């Protein structure tokens, strides 16, 4: 029997990175990748998941909470203690005084984006976003009935929106902007002065500024290491325990909201999922212990070391990196010297080098065939082995 699907699904494109991942796994299970037959196993540099997992104090906190039975529902906005510790982290890390009442703990950054977009956008609205950008962010906008309007952003703009572009493309239907700094897929951030100019332009037009800051903890350049929250209470920040805090599968994130928006988002959270995982929240309290922060900072240094290995190696083999990433764990590399299609290039490297990369198709149409994304979230030995294979095939 045919099932009639909601029309909104027509606005949601397939997640191509997952299609590539499936193809990579298929090749990985073939005889040519079997080490027992002298093959090379696939090296996966396509998925944005840190190889680091939750540190010992976080695991211990989860175990203690589980054994003590601290697993009941929490407030829809999150445990007060966790909201207070997040607020304190903004103070110690960024010098910001954030009222814990403005923080809503969510079931991952995905839930944070869903709550924020549902609270703010509706059919007929437009939301300005850079091209390239993370595909799910625009799909959250589409799911509300609003239209994500992708504006091409090249190397000169660090692959980010700038205030001039926002002003030039603002229309009576524009409701706001959705940015990411640092960005997936480029690892680039918006310069503080430019972010301030964007916020001012949006504010002057009665719009809203949402900034995905899930990679903010993984900044490598002090120039870009500040939060957009410094620009005023009307800025909405989305953050996560997945990347800097190494808790991907725990599905825990948060929003920092204007005070007036908290009740609306709380109402949505109560109805959509009641609360974020109480066990994950109990564990996350330990993220902010000095020993955990020290470990996270060591990991941040390790990611920076990986970036400093990857970028010059790619440049040397002809995969140009127009803007060196200043955060996250991605490199946005130009493969046009080798192929007119990044999709074909990635499949070619999967078959020949047994290295999985991500083609640009997911991240917007402007330069989809020119760029590939490499994730350096894997261990340094794996990264070095993958670079050696790519070098073998390309030089």
Image (spheres, rainbow, N blue to C red):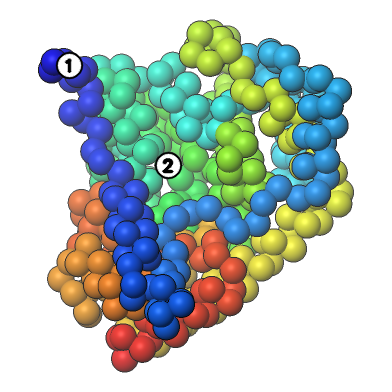
Toward the viewer: 295 or 142?
Answer: 295
Quadrant for the C terminus, please: bottom left
Picture quadrant of residue 206: top left
- According to the picture, the residue beneath numbered tag 2 turns out to be 179
**Relative to 286, does residue 335 appear above or below in the rendering?**
below
Left or right: where 177 falls relative to 377:
left
Q: x, y (%) of residue 361?
A: 24, 54
Identify which residue is drawn at 66% across, 68% down: 302
Identify which residue is drawn at 21% across, 30% down: 11
Q: Nearer the viewer, mark 2 or mark 1?
A: 1
Q: x, y (%) of residue 281?
A: 71, 29
Left or right: where 221 falls relative to 80:
left
Toward the viewer: 170 or 52?
Answer: 52
Name the disc covering residue 148, or none.
none
Left or right: where 279 falls relative to 359:
right
Quadrant for the N terminus, please: top left
**Relative to 3, does residue 134 appear above or below in the rendering?**
below
- According to the picture, the residue beneath numbered tag 1 turns out to be 3
Identify which residue is drawn at 68% across, 66% down: 301
Secondary structure, mark 2, is: strand
Residue 244 seen in the figure: yes
Toward the viewer: 104 or 259?
Answer: 104
Residue 204 seen in the figure: no
């Amino acid at each position: 029997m045919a099932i009639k699907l909601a029309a909104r699904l027509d606005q949601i494109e397939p997640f191509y990175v997952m299609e590539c991942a499936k193809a990579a796994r298929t090749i990985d299970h073939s005889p040519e990748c079997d080490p027992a037959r002298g093959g090379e196993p696939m090296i996966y540099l396509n998925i944005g998941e840190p190889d680091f997992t939750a540190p010992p104090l976080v695991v211990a906190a989860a175990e203690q909470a589980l054994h003590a039975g601290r697993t009941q529902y929490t407030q829809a906005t999150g445990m007060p203690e966790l909201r207070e510790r997040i607020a304190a982290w903004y103070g110690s890390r960024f010098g910001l005084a954030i009222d814990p009442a403005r923080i809503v703990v969510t079931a991952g950054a995905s839930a944070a984006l869903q709550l924020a977009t549902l609270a703010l956008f509706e059919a007929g609205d437009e939301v300005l976003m850079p091209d390239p950008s993370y595909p799910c962010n625009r799909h959250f906008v589409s799911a509300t009935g609003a239209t994500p309007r992708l504006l091409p952003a090249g190397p000169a703009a660090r692959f980010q929106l700038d205030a001039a572009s926002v002003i030039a493309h603002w229309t009576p239907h524009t409701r706001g902007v959705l940015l990411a700094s640092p960005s997936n897929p480029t690892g680039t951030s918006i310069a503080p002065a430019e972010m301030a100019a964007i916020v001012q332009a949006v504010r002057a037009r009665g719009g809203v500024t949402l900034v995905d800051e899930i990679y903010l903890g993984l900044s490598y350049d002090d120039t870009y290491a500040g939060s957009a929250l410094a620009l005023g209470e009307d800025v909405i920040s989305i953050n996560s325990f997945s990347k800097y805090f190494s808790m991907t599968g725990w599905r825990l994130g948060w929003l920092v909201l204007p005070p007036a928006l908290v009740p609306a988002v709380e109402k949505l959270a109560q109805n959509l999922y009641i609360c974020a995982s109480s066990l994950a929240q109990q564990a996350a309290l330990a993220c902010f212990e000095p020993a955990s922060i020290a470990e996270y900072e060591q990991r941040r240094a390790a990611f920076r070391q990986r970036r400093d290995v990857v970028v010059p190696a790619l440049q040397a083999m002809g995969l140009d990196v127009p803007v060196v990433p200043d955060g996250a764990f991605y490199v946005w590399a130009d493969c046009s010297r080798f192929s007119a299609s990044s999709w074909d290039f990635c499949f070619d490297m999967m078959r020949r080098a047994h290295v999985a990369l991500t083609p640009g198709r997911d991240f917007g149409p402007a330069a989809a065939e020119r760029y590939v994304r490499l994730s350096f979230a894997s261990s340094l030995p794996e990264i070095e082995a993958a670079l050696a294979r790519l070098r073998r095939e390309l030089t």
